[in-house]
Amino acid sequence: MRHFTDGVRIRRRMRSLVSVILTLLPFVDLTAATLTRIASLTQPVSGAAAFALPDGRVALIGGGVHVFDPRTLSTITVPHEIPIFSQAAAQLHEGQILVAGGAYTGIQSIGTASWGNNRAELFNSAGNAIDLIGRMNRARMEPQATVLADGRVLITGGWTAEKTSMITRQDVTDGAEIFDPATNAFRPVGSMRIRRFGHTATLLRDGRVLITGGQTEAPAPVWPPALDSTEVFDPVTETFTDGPVMRTKRMDHTATLLEDGRVLIAGGIVFPESDRAASPSTELFHPATNELALGPDLGSRWNHTATRLRDGRVLLFGGAANAIVYDPVTNRVVEKLPFERPRRGHAASLLEEGSVLIFGGGDSEATSDVLRFVPYVAPRRRAVR
């Protein structure tokens, strides 16, 4: 009887211990992959972009400029003239990152305000500094910056707003321009087929750029629905042509280049900030045929991140109360990790050794969390002789 009583006590203690662990770590790993909180940033971050630097550190652009070192779990904050948010950012070379546009324009007088700037800045990781290098041809909030095959950067879309007295004027652009790192200059190119912001822009293997979704009308007085249109930019002719129409209207979605050259378009919402309008569907763009094929449902999610892992699988993190790993070869989910709460607005960066760092984001408010996701890597099977 005593042995039985001791066993009951041990089981109760183990349950208590598990309860404490789950309280301290709300991200519970129920698969072979692991997810742990490894550090905290110096301040909460949301809407940032993360870039792996040549020296192993990670730069966060948005909500400020921060550099995280995964070896020391330390963060430095880079001094900056004005706040950075709703910007575009793209990694050039040697640790340089182009930062273009954004929402902040400075202090306005009472009754007037404006949002959207044309600033162009360059972050240099060697000196941990960010400097103004010029101006784009127009102001832009929520544009996209895509590094082309020749190293130039394509800037597409965006919007601005200006309030005077009781009137607010908003403008969404179809304009595009190219930044040349050799001259630090911007040059306008052909207009997009439709005005848009909050879209995706993905470099294809053949050098073209696939643009999907977003919105074509500014968000006041009410948010309009997202777009189902796509278009393709040709860097040779510097023109945009219509692409296939998506089956679902999408914004706050992701478009990820797969190893075989296809593009996985996942999730998104029709109307902003509405889980009921979030899409579980995916679509696959085939560059050879310029067609879209229906992909598998991967769960309703928006404002998530999609990271192609070293083995070609794709980590869809957050945008809902879970993370999944999708295998494009088998066309199915091979890992799933549930969360306690949804996580959105975070940034993700793939490290050289194969793990993924997740920065900030949150549910109702931003966090300073730094998480490390380590994917499960199946052991290689020995060949049968």
Image (cartoon, rainbow, N blue to C red):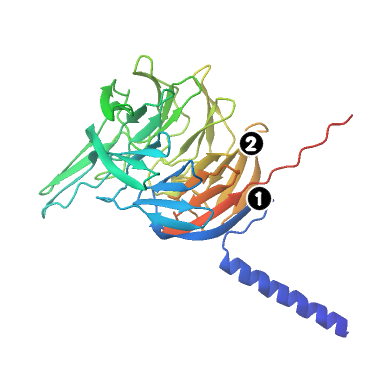
Query: Which mark is in front, 1 or 2?
Result: 2
| Marks 1 and 2, how far apart at CA | 14 Å
Question: How far across and down, in percent of the image, does residue 7 sit?
Answer: 82, 78
Q: Position of residue 165 (x, y in %)?
A: 10, 49
Q: How many residues crowd around disc 2 within 10 Å: few (fewer than 14), some, or many (20 or more)?
A: few
Which residue lies most toward the top here? 237
In screen coordinates, is 257 left or right of 119? Answer: right
Residue 144 coordinates in the image, percent (x, y): 36, 34
Say if residue 301 shows up in the picture.
no
| Residue bearing mark 2 | 311
Amino acid type, callout 2: Asp
Upstream in the sequence, badge 1 or badge 2?
1
Q: Which mark is residue 302?
A: none
Label 1: element kind: loop
198, 292: nearer the viewer? 198
Asked if residue 118 can be seen in this view, the reply is: yes
Q: In the image as oriented, which residue stretches furthest toward the front? A: 127
| Residue at the (54%, 59%) spot, across then down | 38
Q: Please, is residue 286 above or below residue 364 in the view? A: above
- Local crowd size for mark 1, using a 10 Å CA cut-off: few (<14), some (14–19), many (≥20): some
SS of the residue under disc 2 = loop
- Residue at the image point whose x is 56% and y is 30% from the top: 258
- Apparent side of residue 319 relative to residue 239 in the rendered image (left or right): right
The residue identified by callout 1 is: 33
Left or right: residue 210 versus residue 308 is left
Label 1 is placed on what type of residue?
Ala
Which quarter of the picture shows residue 175?
Answer: top left
Give the image location of residue 364, x and y in percent.
41, 59
- Quadrant containing the C terminus is top right
Against 65, residue 24 (above or below) is below
